[in-house]
Amino acid sequence: MPRPTDPVPTDLLRIDDELSDEERLVRDTVRKFAADRILPEVADWFEAGTVPRDLFPELGKLGVLGMHLRGHGCAGMGAIAYGVACRELEAADSGLRSMVSVQGSLAMFPIWKYGTDEQKEAWLPRMAAGDAVGCFGLTEPDHGSDPAGMTTHAKRNGGDWVLSGSKMWITNGSIADIAVVWAGTEDGIRGFLVPRGTRGFTARNIHKKLSLRASVTSELHFDEVRLPASAVLPGAAGLKGPLSCLSEARYGILWGVTGSARTCFESAAEYARTREQFGQKIGGFQLTQRKLAWMLADLQRAQLLALHLGRLKEAGQITPEQISLGKMSNVRTAIDIAREARTVLGANGVTLEYPVIRHANNLESVLTYEGTEEIHTLALGQAITGISAYR
């Protein structure tokens, strides 16, 4: 019989034994950073609806910003190492992992993949170090799941471009030094690099959020913003460009949410081993044990799925449909675990003294961003039937 001082068995199947020495070093390093720097303060940040911008240089020093990219100051680590880092970051808070995902997979990745050598050298080393912050402007107030319907547009004017429109729900938006903005042009959808301070470009924070509160979420406005030809990402044309960035971010999410789920499970298990009702520990009741057993089983399945998809990604064999399956399944699993864990904690589960309600609230946003659960469901439906249900 386990004693309250024994560790909670969150890896009963010893999945982390499959990690390489380098990947375990990433795990331990990021987990220690989260424990030392994030966990003592994140509940206060969440309650206040703020997060310090100076975390970025610290994350840069940690080596997790654009860590899956090679060259230009990036660490060049494998997909599984990146996934493990996302898991350990999100075990602390989804907002922290979102900051890192947006920086590396949505802002740095398009510059790295579609940019010129000059664009890469101007931005990637600074972003990898956390000295410059990036954001990704795709979603619009009236066009979320249907980015092809975007109304933000850019028109040629002499040798320049003039950009107008707005973007919504942009992580890091108001603190970003560079915005990667997607807009319709006469040649189709193109990506533009818009530096902070460019005339006509403004960003304002979205307030009164009850989810991802320890994260900056903004609305971007572009009022005839004049950009030079060198602001265009030349390698990206059409919707394929931004969608490839979203695949990178979704991959990090399907790993990250296993961290949230793990934290919620650990909190519930520890609480069950110490909380007494009716003269005994609630962990001794059959209903509580059933909850914990299924939470652990679901968590281990999600972790196995993440590891398998990581291997496919490292082999260059992963597909968007596989990423959709991982994002859809693992986020839903994480939400279910968070909600079940909350019931084990009872009324204590809705306070910030414990991490469960914070993770549960955050996961409601994760369920929606980078493709809603409904869109990923239909992407899989199309893969199964060959019929598109949303076009």
Image (cartoon, rainbow, N blue to C red):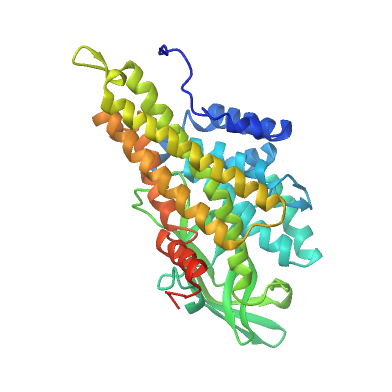
Quadrant of the rendering where the N terminus is positioned:
top left
Residue 268 visible in the shown view: yes
Measuring from the top left, give residue 134's x and y in whole percent.
61, 56
- Name the residue at the front extreme: 385
Measuring from the top left, give residue 196's x and y in whole percent.
60, 62
Measuring from the top left, give residue 87's x and y in whole percent.
55, 40
For residue 155, above or below residue 307: below
Front residue of 25 and 221: 25
Quadrant of the rendering where the C terminus is positioned:
bottom left
For residue 7, above or below residue 149: above
Which residue occupies 71% across, 56% down? Answer: 316
Which residue occupies 36% across, 51% down? Answer: 209
Which residue occupies 61% across, 39% down? Answer: 84
Measuring from the top left, give residue 129's x and y in whole percent.
70, 45
Q: Quadrant of residue 144?
A: bottom left
- Could you tell whether 303 is left or right of 115 in the image? left
Front residue of 56 and 87: 87
Residue 49 visible in the shown view: no
- Could you tell whether 51 is left or right of 320 in the image? left
Q: Quadrant of residue 348?
A: top left
- Could you tell whether 279 is left or right of 145 in the image? left
